[in-house]
Image (cartoon, rainbow, N blue to C red):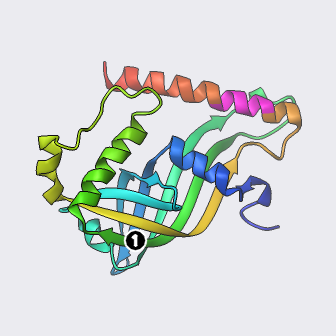
């Protein structure tokens, strides 16, 4: 038996790009002296097939996002516990999730003008589909921050889509698991916000 099970792997790059565009907050991992450095930041997939990001210059990982250094990136889609109670057949408890694992090489982009334009473009992307804010090119706060931000791009060498969605079950159970994923993700956000922000 191979691992991970092929039925839970999605090799369609367009599916993975949709995850990246819908859930752009990435887990970015670099390694220095056998120690992983991990940062969570939004990455935007552009038309050239690269990921574009920005990082605080003081973040120790910033020094590793240049010179074609290797990085691993994880994008996380929806996920939830699946109770056997939702199935029409006898099953065990499980966890369903959507993840995209990428490996690539990071290169620094030194141009302040490129950084400024990239911040504007990323804001436009993140404000979709109903933009309520426009980051103007002459925004003084942004212009003052440019000296404290590093811009980088990542060329993607390896794609792996992990879409564990009860695909090995009967059609009705697959549909039940899909509905449960939607229901529990909405519910868990509401419950979390109630507990944390009382």
Residue 92: x and y in percent read 76, 41
Relative image position of residue 125 (x, y in whole percent): 42, 41
Residue 68 vertical placement versus 46 (above, below): below
Residue shown at 29% from the left, 67% from the top: 61
Quarter containing the N terminus: bottom right
Is 38 displayed left or right of 79 in the figure? left
The answer to whether residue 89 shows anywhere in this view is no
Residue at x 41%, y 60% (from the top left corner):
28
Residue 177 lies in the magenta stretch: yes
Q: Which residue is drawn at 78% across and 68% down?
A: 2
Report if residue 153 lies within the magenta region.
Answer: no
Point 39% across, 24% down: residue: 193
- Which secondary structure class fits the magenta region best? helix
Quadrant position of residue 134: top left
Residue 186 lies in what quarter of the image? top right
- Look at mark 1 in the image and give the residue it sits on: 106
Span highlighted in magenta in the image:
175-181
Q: Where does the C terminus fall, quadrant-wise?
A: top left
Query: For the residue labelled by badge 1, is the local secondary structure a helix, a strand or a loop?
Result: strand
Can residue 18 be seen here? The reply is yes
């Amino acid at each position: 038996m191979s691992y991970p099970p092929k039925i839970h792997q999605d090799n369609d790059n367009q599916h993975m790009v949709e995850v990246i565009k819908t859930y752009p907050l990435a887990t970015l991992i670099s390694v220095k002296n056998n120690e992983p450095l991990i940062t969570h930041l939004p990455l935007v997939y552009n038309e050239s097939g690269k990921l574009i990001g920005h990082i605080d210059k003081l973040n120790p990982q910033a020094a590793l996002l240049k010179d074609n250094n290797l990085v691993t990136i994880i994008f996380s889609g929806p996920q939830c516990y699946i109770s056997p109670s939702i199935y029409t057949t006898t099953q065990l408890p499980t966890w369903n999730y959507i993840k995209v694992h990428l490996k690539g090489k990071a290169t620094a982009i030194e141009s302040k003008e490129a950084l400024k334009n990239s911040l504007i473009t990323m804001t436009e992307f993140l404000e979709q589909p109903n933009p309520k804010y426009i980051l103007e090119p002459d925004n003084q706060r942004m212009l003052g921050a440019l000296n404290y931000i590093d811009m980088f791009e990542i060329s993607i060498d390896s794609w792996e889509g992990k879409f564990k969605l009860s695909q090995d079950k009967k059609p009705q159970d697959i549909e039940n698991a899909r509905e449960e994923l939607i229901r529990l993700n909405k519910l868990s956000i509401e419950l979390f916000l109630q507990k944390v922000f009382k």
